[in-house]
Amino acid sequence: MKDYYETLGVSRDADGGAVKSAYRKLAMKYHPDRNPGDSEAEHRFKEINEAYEVLKDEQKRAAYDRFGHEAFTNGGGGGPGQGGFGGFSAGGFADIFDEMFGDFMGGRRGNSAARGSDLRYNMEISLDEAFAGKTAQIRVPTAATCDACDGSGAEGGAQPVTCQTCQGRGRVRAQQGFFTIERTCPTCHGAGRVIDDPCRVCDGQGRVHREKSLQVNIPAGVEDGTRIRLAGEGEAGLRGAPAGDLYIFLSVAPHRLFQRDGANIYCRVPIPMTTAALGGSVEVPTIDGGRAKITVPAGTQANQQFRLKAKGMPVLRSTSVGDMYVEVGIETPVNLTKRQKELLREFEDAGKGRKTNPESEGFFARVKEFWEDLTE
């Protein structure tokens, strides 16, 4: 027979907390409900429980440390489940079972009809719609409550009756050797109730597949990836169980004029070379559909930004509003006439000897120093 300490993977001087922790991990891994039809896992689960029943009890553990497995034979005062150092009862394991599997199994006792599945719906909206918000109508294929039986699953709307196999608990107990195992009732599948005369429309499911129309309110300021939850609008549960939820995942389509960064809006506006040099003004669009005029000072450089306060996106669930940044791009003229070329050459000649291009002059000064350093 395998050593109990080896079975749980703990040392002989392990304290009670370490023993319990090792047991929990192994019981979770090899539990029959997680390994249906796996006889090897079921065997390991039995070994784990047998080892834990001994090592968790100080008196049993002391006897085991002294006499080994012989302490629990007929000559040693009874096995782990035969009295002696305290007969095994389902109570100790049931408490740990509740602790480990209560949420996983939806509770050990009582009705556990299957809650409906959550659904996901992907929706693309424009940046303008994200700015202003909108109300959208969507159609979602889902499992809805059967109208013929009002979700009960029984013909004529009759109520299901208590399952005689589990007496309404949804769980059945089976004796396996010296300990008791609880499993989902095979008759009612955990619901605790059964239907004598199933509904002919939904075949006793209490729900039918159809398309549902919903209205979705999209608040102003939503961002790409925002998730909207509609509670109870997912699939209907089996035989009157609670419905799941519907999750709307939003994606914001790229805009032809604006780029968004959080609550701020960016817009790149090309301006003529002459406007950048001499100064002037330019009219730009805003995300709210309006217009704004920007004063361009003389000597404006490429990629310079101008801020329009509170002309950006609204902040979701806030009264704050982002800003708009206009970045100017200086456009070099093309398809020049002969006269335009002559004027540009005259302009170039007139500027010789004068510091009219500080950025390029500074750059080439640094280049000259770089080359001189290399020749030293």
Image (tube, rainbow, N blue to C red):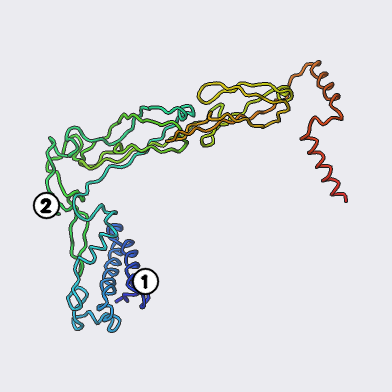
Q: Residue at x 29, y 74 (%)?
A: 55
Report x, y in % for residue 289.
51, 22
**In the rendering, at what x and y percent does residue 22 appear?**
35, 68
In terms of sequence position, does the residue under pointer 2 or pointer 1 come before the other? Answer: 1
Q: Amino acid at mark 1?
A: Gly
Give, as a three-letter code, the residue at label 2: Gln
Q: Is residue 25 left or right of residue 90?
A: right
Q: x, y (%) of residue 244?
A: 29, 41
Q: In terms of image quadrants, where is residue 196? A: top left
User: Mark 2 highlights which residue?
Assistant: 164
Position of the N terminus, as image quadrant, is: bottom left
Q: Are marks 2 and 1 in contact (CB under 8 Å)?
A: no
Nearer the observer, 3 or 216: 216
Q: Nearer the viewer, residue 330 or 89?
A: 330
Q: Which residue is mark 1?
A: 9
| Residue 243 position within the rendered picture, expressed as x and y whole percent measured from the top left | 27, 40
Q: Secondary structure at mark 1?
A: loop
- Secondary element at image label 2: loop
Q: Residues within 10 Å of mark 1 (few under 14, many from 20)?
A: some
376 is higher (above) or lower (below) than 207: below
